[in-house]
Image: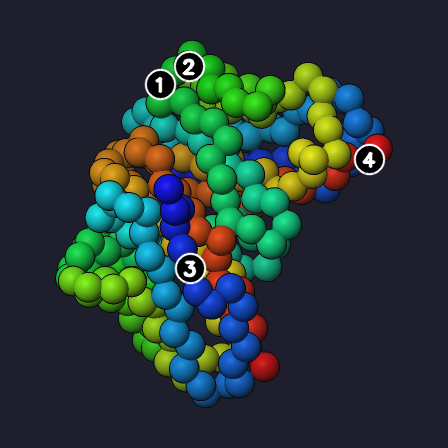
Amino acid sequence: GDSVTQMEGPVTLSEEAFLTINCTYTATGYPSLFWYVQYPGEGLQLLLKATKADDKGSNKGFEATYRKETTSFHLEKGSVQVSDSAVYFCALTSGTYKYIFGTGTRLKVLA
Amino acid sequence: NAGVMQNPRHLVRRRGQEARLRCSPMKGHSHVYWYRQLPEEGLKFMVYLQKENIIDESGMPKERFSAEFPKEGPSILRIQQVVRGDSAAYFCASSRLAVEGETQYFGPGTRLLVL
């Protein structure tokens, strides 16, 4: 079945460091891909999405490119802030409305 | 412009009691989804509803769990005779359309603790 695999956390970085959170997927067909962020005690917020190969989603300095050849959708940010500390979820939909989520990657940014 | 509303935010129940979780979708959204997040895991789809109809309950446990979305009022996820394994965060989401690629907007969740 369809699945999403994310890198294990937690990821701890110093402020202004470069961030990469890896996400790979398995899906039949051509899925849509999402990154959601969950701040402590809150629900999930859409960070960015891409619906076809080679699309780049971007928001708030975060970027991810839909790579069909490597079945990946890695999240990147050039310079993280303490306020970026959260759990990041990669997700997909493939021919359906059901979201399939990865297990989440916790990011901690130190001042 | 209110987002998806869920209440209560936290719910404590003893084994055998009933838990009732409520969700009001975003204005203009008629599609509601419930997901469950077990500790240290991602969210798992449970059920998809439209007004007065359960469209897809393929992710819902067969026993003790039920969901509704009445003509008037919020969607309700009901768990009867709760057990410790039901302790989790339950998230509701809504969308304008129910198609692949459509953004779902999530509420803040209800964190259920079963003692």
Callout 3 and callout 2 share a chain = no
Measured along the vertical axis of the image, is residue A39 above or below residue A29?
Answer: below
Q: Are marks 1 and 2 in contact (CB under 8 Å)?
A: yes
* Residue sitting farthest toward the bottom: B16
Give the distance between the C-alpha atoms of the residues marked 3 and 2, in whole angstroms: 33 Å
Q: Confirm or deny contact between disc 3 and disc 4 (CB under 8 A).
A: no
Name the residue located 51 percent from the left edge and 85 percent from the top edge: B15
The residue carrying mark 1 is: A52
Residue under mark 2: which chain is it in? A
Q: Amino acid at mark 4?
A: Leu
Residue B104 figure quarter: top left
Q: Residue under circle 3?
A: B6
Marks 2 and 4, Cα distance to the nearest angstrom? 31 Å
Residue under circle 4? A110
Q: Which residue is mark 2?
A: A55
Residue B86 percent coordinates (x, y) = 49, 71
Judge if badges 3 and 4 mark residues of a common chain: no
What is the C-alpha distance between the residues marked 1 and 4? 35 Å
The residue mark sitting in front, 3 or 1, is: 3
